[in-house]
Image (tube, rainbow, N blue to C red):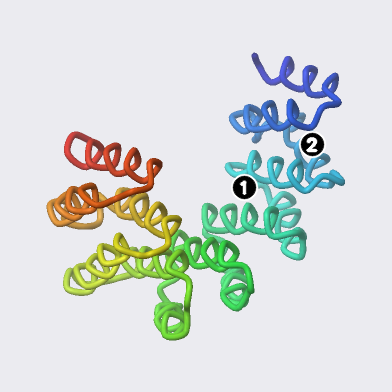
Amino acid sequence: MDAKQLLQTLKNTPNETQMLKIIPKLGKYAKGKTVENALASLSESSSEKIRAAAIDALLTNSHKHIKKLVTAHMTDTNEVKTKCFEYMGYHRMKQAEPILLAHLNDADRWVRYFAILNLGDMGAYDVIEDVEKHLENETSDVVKSGCYLTLVLLSETEAEKDYYEQKLIQLLNSSDEVARYVTINNLADLKNHLKREPIINAFYARLQIESDEENITTLKNAIRSLKYW
């Protein structure tokens, strides 16, 4: 369906579940004025999931008023906030640095994780010390994984990258299966920034002892990605 058909279908869809299937498809048209207005309107929905989906669909739209809209949602719920973080990282909004840093103290590990991740995407080299300091007291392996990924992206020497690569590999043995899942994906995503062989070997080693079915599938896919892509 083209943008016009998607908007018409959305207009005639009262069911939230169905709306959540349509909204992401509007993302490819998000720079168009009509779709932009529709998504901006949906970002003010009473539904947290609709607001989050609308902001997610606006990801590639760099218009000034959309940046302002996203910034205004930084006091929204956690689900919406994390989509705002992704937008800020994607557009390298340097003015958002203090906001993301402040969220490293949030009680929710996913808020901390996405805040740290998008500081890396933003290329915020001046926050390296803040990230390292945060690691000293961080208790969640999920967030630690995000910290190490960000530090790899911000590292300026091969020695630093190697060090943080080893830290990520160690997290493959975390007792938290979600942290293991996140770390598998983070290491796979860093394939163009790190040496692949140590990662592949670590994935094979983890595969021998991994008990979580989703993680087993993710490991196999990650190994395939690293070896052939």
The residue beneath circle 2 is 37
Q: Position of residue 66 (x, y in %)?
A: 71, 49
Q: Position of residue 69 (x, y in %)?
A: 76, 54
**Along the line of sight, the residue nearer the viewer: 78 or 10:** 78
Distance between the Cα atoms at labels 2 and 1? 14 Å
Q: Residue at x 33, y 48 (%)?
A: 211
Specify the amino acid type for callout 2. Asn
Q: Residue at x 76, y 65 (%)?
A: 75
First in sequence: mark 2 vs mark 1: 2
**Along the line of sight, the residue nearer the viewer: 226 or 157:** 226
Secondary structure, mark 1, is: loop
Q: Is residue 154 above or below residue 73?
A: below
Q: Quadrant of the N terminus?
A: top right
Characterize the local packing of mark 2: few (<14), some (14-19) or many (20 or more) Cα atoms within 10 angstroms. Answer: some
Q: Quadrant of the C terminus?
A: top left
The residue beneath circle 1 is 62
Q: Quadrant of residue 182?
A: bottom left
Q: Residue at x 65, y 34 (%)?
A: 30
Q: Which mark is residue 140?
A: none
